[in-house]
Image (tube, rainbow, N blue to C red):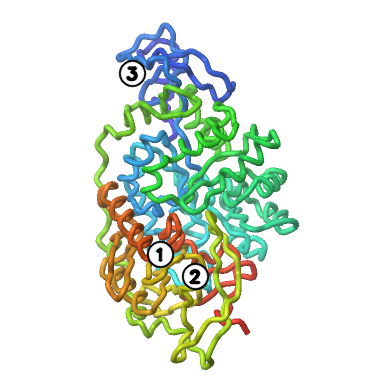
Amino acid sequence: MILTLDERRKLIQTGLGDSPLDLLIENVQVVNVYTGRIELGAIGIVDGRIVTPYAQGYDTERVVDGGGRFAMPGFFDTHVHIDSTLVVPENLSHLIVPHGTTVMLADPMEIANVAGLPGFKALLKNINQLPYHIFLEVSSRVPTAPGLETTGGELDLLDVREILCWPEAVSLGELDPSKVLEMRDEYLLKVEAAHTLGKICNGHAVGRVGKELVAYACGGLSDDHECVDYAEALTRLQLGMAVLIREGSTERNLDMILKGMVADGFYNSPHLMFCTDDKHPDEILDEGHIDFMVNRAIELGVPPVTAIQMATINAAKHFRIEHIVGSLSPARWADIILAEDLEHIVPGDVYVRGQHIASDGKLIVTLPESDYPDWLYQTVDVTRGKQASDFVLEVKRDSAKVWVIDLYPDQIINEQIQAELQVVNGSVMSDVSRDIIKLAVVERYGKNGNIGITFVRRFGLQNGALASSVAHDHHNIIVAGTNDADMAACVQAIEEMQGGLAIASGGEVLGKLPLPIGGLMSEEPVGEIIQNLEEINNIYKSLGGTLPAPFMTISFIGLPTVPQLGLTDMGLVDVLEHILISPLVD
């Protein structure tokens, strides 16, 4: 990643004209993210790095005609959990690189929660052979909620310090407010470790305002990707925190933030950038990746060059890697998008490290083979949750008042409401007429057999159940259903698959998507994964479901760090108070 002395000498010699270029992409309009201008140019490349974007009078081994197209740097996803795409990093290339994404700032906390440091390392085995760059946001909270959830693995302070020293590591990954506001030494020492190495710390300031937000910023956090509107984003910027505008499958924040910024004339900040956080492969295929966000920003009134800067140099500067990536400047990797139009950017050709990687929406290179250890395919061991009786919430009354997680459209935040539900044979029942169904988290690591139970509103199911072993951040099995028998059928199917998504009705499993690598990902071709996902989404709709991305939604309901309520295998979590509470209202 860092240039050796010989590599630096080669660049300097080529810059002087004493050594020929490997490649010259001539006849292009260079989007200069430093000057903010569009300038006629010819991009000279040697050893995969840019010599100059204005290569006139240089000898070259090969010339490519850019056709007068616009040349811009490859796009950045500034905060993503790659393991949440359901696709292994190798195969993810097919989805993101043709859309112009060449840099992924990844926090692999999902695999770490399942399998600790060995799982973390296994996921990243091919990191340097991929046709895109992965820089690491080192997972800071594995587990996310110690004492409130069961996980398969953990990363302690020594592990975090070790990974922070890796050359690919650029930051400490998202740290939620409870760790900072409660001044827990372990997490503050992780911040110190990152800062000692000259690296930033990523934030996760969901729902925090006023003095709590001030105190959180004092904890050394540099950004926030949890803003849901302009007012919230502005408070972060005012305190010197960058805003990573998020547009994932269920976290649709871009319009709310940018509409306010455009209306206020405040969008030309170097501290704004883009991220997906968590986005399923079918939606990347349908609407795009970071290019979708760039184009939507332009539609909302952000000047094209400014939108491109948000997707490139702003991120590179924020993560202190602008000497490596983020611009078409000397000594940077030659990560280049060629596009016909700036008003609506469609990557026609994509180069990564000077190699032609994608053309007309398709990858044109051979990928490295994925190779994961056998034990990573054996991470699901369910001791309770395969019988309908395991999901009984017992009450000795005719009715019970319960807490309900009320979903918030297009967001991962939720509301805490109450509902009076009927009790039949001592068990609290779902109420489909009010769109309130049972929700449970089943411990899947064979450690204790815990099952946490509560209720959720707005899934739309008229009958049946759906479940997932992708359940942030503990990644136990989370299941929502109108009846206990279908919930148990889903859990049985997930154990048989050693992880995945399942949907059932009438005691029969109607659809499933195996995710055997850590219970999170599949090595199958992207097209097959997307087809399976679309099939189970359609089954969900046939059962009355109304959510656009039900399996992404269910994966976040259990998150014990996003207000107001979360659910783990240990029970219902009051997120702001960071305590377990009864699902029954006193």
- Check disc 3 and report the residue beneath it: 22
As rendered, which of 484 and 24 lies closer to the eye?
484
- Check disc 1 and report the residue beneath it: 544
> Pointer 3 and pointer 1: residues touching (CB < 8 Å)?
no
Q: Is residue 168 above or below residue 377?
A: above
Work out how far the residue at label 2 is from the one at label 3, CA to CA, in angstroms. Answer: 62 Å
Q: Residue at x 33, y 18 (%)?
A: 22
Q: Is residue 363 above or below residue 576?
A: above
Q: In x, y percent, where is residue 45?
A: 39, 20
Work out how far the residue at label 3 is from the one at label 1, CA to CA, in angstroms. Answer: 58 Å
- Check disc 2 and report the residue beneath it: 435
Q: How many residues crowd around disc 1 within 10 Å: few (fewer than 14), some, or many (20 or more)?
A: some
Tell me if 168 is positioned left or right of 366 in this view: right
Figure disc tally: 3
Q: In x, y percent, where is residue 251?
A: 52, 52
Q: Which mark is residue 193?
A: none
Q: In x, y percent, where is residue 376?
A: 30, 61
Disc nearer the start of the sequence (2/1): 2
Question: Looking at the picture, which amino acid does disc 2 mark?
Answer: Asp
Q: How many residues crowd around disc 2 within 10 Å: few (fewer than 14), some, or many (20 or more)?
A: some
Q: Residue at x 49, y 67 (%)?
A: 558
Q: In x, y percent, where is residue 541?
A: 38, 60
Quadrant of the drawing holding the C terminus: bottom right
Q: Residue at x 30, y 74 (%)?
A: 492
Q: Secondary structure at mark 2?
A: loop
Disc nearer the start of the sequence (3/1): 3
